[in-house]
């Protein structure tokens, strides 16, 4: 396990840190990804952060490795250090990690968060669609990922950053991560020749292809190299629907 790195981080207090980025990305147009949520939680008394995304007015998806105590989320944010009027801070009523989540291999790295009350949908807060068609994404497909995670120099941005990534062949992740990579539950993305990637703190954010959430930032090597592994949302659709229906208010 020494070479794997779950993409969450301990929150670093870094006043005056320069705006960093995902790796090789750029600042997103404010509120152009209204489904994005900033997630804070605490594990072993340390504050950590992740991304999450709104899939129903009262439910978000994120990675199971973002589980902890005192989970809080901010919707409608661009600059998480500013008191923006668009922000909605809503308490998390329950966090439901996938029952087969394995914290050693990161298999089934997916978690639902139910909010205490429904989010108000508007131009800064909106839903992201889940995949519908049965087709597997083809290698070469262009997708994007966004987050408030750090760049390779460990600089944390205040504003949401985004980067474009291409889906890669399963075999590339199989070669890089061996038995950890599971082609049923995971997908592989990020060109090894490009310095563009999701990184620490981006965990739980969506890999978006054609405006649909196809993946969830899960793990990769700690040198930031590509390709990296994303939870394959398609494989969990029935669990997502069943779990959301079971917890209607
Ligand atoms: C991983 O899961 C095992 C079994 O569920 C549990 O005992 C252990 O505390 C977990 N470890 C971490 C770091 O969460
Ligand atoms: C892949 O994940 C699925 C779902 O958890 C599991 O049933 C299957 O055994 C895994 N495959 C391998 C090769 O580990």
Image (spheres, rainbow, N blue to C red):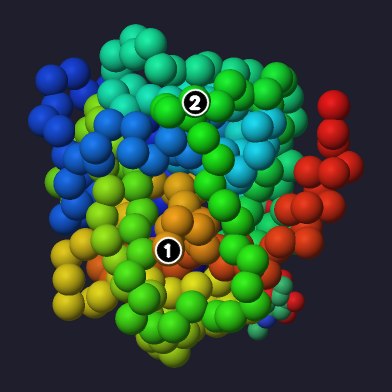
Task: Give the CA distance from mark 1 to mark 2.
Answer: 22 Å
User: Eyeballing the image, is 117 above or below 218?
Assistant: above
* Residue pointed to by mark 1: 209
Residue at 70% x, 47% y is 97
Q: Quadrant of residue 175?
A: bottom left
Q: Could you say where residue 171 lies in the image, as x and y percent from the top left?
A: 44, 89
Image position of 215 (left or right of 97)? left
Image position of 95 (left or right of 26)? right
* Residue pointed to by mark 2: 122
Q: As drawn, which residue projects farthest toward the front?
A: 123
Q: Could you say where residue 75 lies in the image, as x and y percent from the top left?
A: 48, 26
Label 1, secondary structure: give it: strand
Q: Nearer the viewer, mark 1 or mark 2?
A: 2
Count residues near mark 1 (Cα–Cα under 10 Å), then give few for <14, some for 14-19, many for 20+.
many
User: Eyeballing the image, is 20 above or below 222?
Assistant: above
User: Eyeballing the image, is 122 above or below 4?
Assistant: above
Q: Could you say where residue 177 lies in the image, as x and y percent from the top left?
A: 44, 78
Nearest to the observer: residue 228 or residue 133: 133
Residue at 55% x, 80% y is 136
The circle on residue 174 is: none
Label 2, secondary structure: give it: loop
Q: Is residue 98 visible?
A: yes
Nearest to the observer: residue 247 or residue 221: 247
């Amino acid at each position: 396990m020494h070479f794997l790195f779950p993409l969450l981080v301990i929150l670093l207090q870094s006043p005056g840190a320069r705006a960093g980025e995902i790796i090789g990305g750029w600042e997103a147009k404010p509120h152009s990804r209204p489904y994005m949520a900033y997630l804070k939680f605490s594990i072993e008394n340390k504050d950590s952060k992740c991304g999450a995304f709104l899939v129903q007015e009262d439910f978000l998806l994120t990675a199971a490795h973002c589980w902890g105590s005192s989970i809080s989320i901010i919707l409608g944010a661009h600059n998480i250090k500013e008191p923006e009027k668009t922000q909605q801070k809503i308490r998390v009523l329950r966090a439901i990690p996938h029952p087969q989540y394995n914290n050693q291999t990161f298999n089934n790295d997916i978690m639902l968060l139910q909010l205490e009350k429904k989010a108000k949908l508007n131009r800064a807060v909106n839903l992201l669609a889940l995949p519908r068609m049965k087709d597997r994404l083809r290698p070469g497909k262009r997708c994007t990922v966004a987050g408030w995670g750090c760049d390779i120099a460990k600089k944390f941005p205040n504003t949401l950053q985004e980067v474009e990534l291409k889906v890669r062949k399963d075999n590339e992740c199989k070669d890089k991560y061996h038995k950890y990579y599971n082609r049923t539950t995971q997908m592989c993305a990020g060109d090894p020749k490009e310095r563009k990637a999701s990184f620490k703190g981006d965990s739980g954010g969506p890999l978006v292809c054609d405006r649909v959430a196809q993946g969830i930032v899960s793990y990769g090597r700690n040198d930031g190299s590509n390709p990296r592994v994303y939870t394959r949302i398609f494989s969990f659709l029935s669990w997502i629907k069943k779990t959301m229906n079971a917890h209607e208010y």
